[in-house]
Amino acid sequence: MIQIRELEFGYPEGEFRLRIEDLDVPRGETLAVIGPSGTGKTTFLNLVAGVVTPRSGRVTTGEVEISSLGDDARRRFRIRHVGFVFQEFELMEHLNVLDNILLPFRIHPVLHLSDAVRDRACALAEEVAVADKLRRDVTHLSQGERQRVAVCRALLTQPGLLLADEPTGNLDPANKEHVLDIVFDQARKHDSTLVVVTHDHSVLDRFDRTLDFRDFV
């Protein structure tokens, strides 16, 4: 599912550099990414999703060398094949909860919004206990509720690749376990690859493998 070869990345300004010589993540694997702040964990997710591209080297995601695609082609690929839970949620504050969950189907014609998709959005909202807030503005949600909405949006397209940046950071222990159960269940159901950045080492035994980014600095 993910193959990285001789990758080098750096921002135009600043001293940060990320180097990954060789990394493979097979389809269906669940991978936890750990390491101190500033070691490139979020950047890694952005590279895999095609949000950013490397200075050199190759990033292949789902048989597509995403690092060689143009901006629009990477965006189309990401919308269709990648579910992303961003650390800052990236919810649209002018939209209500339901429309935020449905957002991938509204921003690009590569996806078709249907009644079945709406039903799936409502079912996901029910699973994470925000179904009673579907018509509420996201500005009126708690941080934990916003996080659960972001998880629903990432799962809605039933993507082959699920990326999550601290997806349980704002959740209480009970909701943390419940949301993780849902994410893992959806990944298994659709044979998705799951990559999660986390600082919560208490959840690491749930993953097939742990990748420590201290090895890349």
Image: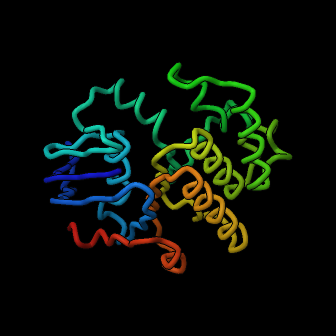
Tell me residue 38's x, y (percent).
32, 63
Q: Quadrant of residue 49?
A: top left
Tell me residue 54's x, y (percent).
21, 44
Tell me residue 117's x, y (percent).
69, 32
Number of numbered discs visible in the structure rendering: 0
Q: Is residue 43 above or below residue 114?
A: below
Q: How is the image coloured?
A: rainbow
Determine the residue positioned at 72% across, 72% down. Answer: 174
Quarter of the image containing the C terminus? bottom left
Q: Quadrant of residue 184?
A: bottom right
Q: Is residue 139 above or below residue 207?
A: above
Q: Is residue 136 above or below residue 14?
A: above
Q: Is residue 191 above or below residue 34?
A: above
Side of 38 relative to 177 (left or right): left
Determine the residue positioned at 72% across, 39% down. Answer: 120
Tell me residue 10's x, y (percent).
20, 49
